[in-house]
Image (cartoon, rainbow, N blue to C red):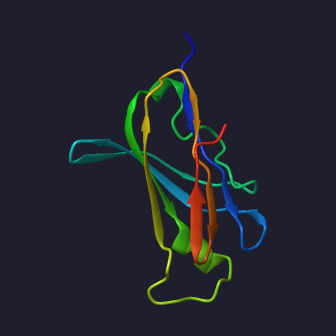
């Protein structure tokens, strides 16, 4: 039986390009406890260089990806707001199949975001 893993891809829909250098944090949620498992930054293609949750650490449960959208928007030259409309973008999701590839992409612009379970 193969083991699953978790990946993401962040695209800047306002600019029509990958969102490079965007920091991402992954947490495991167990009841009221939130444990940091990984911290990564997207590469030039808007992806992380390795799975966010590799096969060796992959398990069923509830997780949360937190995308540092505000810092990315600031660095990419989007005029600042105080506070910024989108700053931290949390996506809480469940992993129910320990053998599957879970891909959780983020489409972002200064005033909107979208996600889905990709492939």
> Residue at the spot x=57%, y=15% of the render?
2
Location of the N terminus by quadrant is top right
Pick the residue in front: 85 or 75.
85
Q: Residue furthest right?
A: 16
Q: Position of residue 43 (x, y in %)?
A: 69, 54
Q: Based on the displayed image, in which of its 4 quarters is residue 109 positioned?
A: bottom right
Is 62 left, or right, of 55 in this rendering? left
Q: Based on the displayed image, in which of its 4 quarters is residue 44 positioned?
A: bottom right
Q: Position of residue 67 (x, y in %)?
A: 51, 60
Q: Where is residue 36 in the image (x, y as percent from the top left)?
A: 36, 47
Location of the C terminus by quadrant is top right
Is 64 left, or right, of 45 in this rendering? left
> Residue at the spot x=75%, y=54% of the render?
45
> Residue at the spot x=66%, y=44% of the render?
49
Pick the residue in front: 113 or 26.
113
The answer to whether residue 19 is seen in the rendering is no
Reply above or below: 69 against 23: below
The answer to whether residue 117 is seen in the rendering is yes
Is 44 left, or right, of 117 in this rendering? right
Q: Based on the displayed image, in which of its 4 quarters is residue 112 positioned?
A: bottom right
Reply above or below: 11 against 96: below
Reply above or below: 89 against 119: below
> Residue at the spot x=64%, y=55% of the render?
42
Q: Which residue lies furthest to the top in this view?
A: 1
Is 44 left, or right, of 60 in this rendering? right
């Amino acid at each position: 039986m193969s083991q699953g893993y978790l990946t993401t891809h962040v695209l800047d829909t306002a600019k029509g390009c990958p969102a490079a250098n965007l920091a991402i944090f992954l947490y495991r949620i167990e009841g009221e406890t939130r444990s940091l498992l990984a911290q990564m930054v997207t590469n030039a293609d808007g992806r992380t260089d390795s799975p966010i949750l590799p096969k060796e650490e992959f398990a069923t449960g509830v997780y949360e990806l937190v995308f540092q959208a505000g810092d990315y928007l600031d660095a990419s030259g989007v005029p600042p707001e105080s506070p910024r409309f989108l700053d931290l973008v949390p996506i809480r999701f469940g992993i129910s199949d320990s053998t599957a590839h879970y891909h959780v992409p983020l489409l972002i612009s200064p005033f909107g975001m979208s996600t889905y379970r990709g492939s």
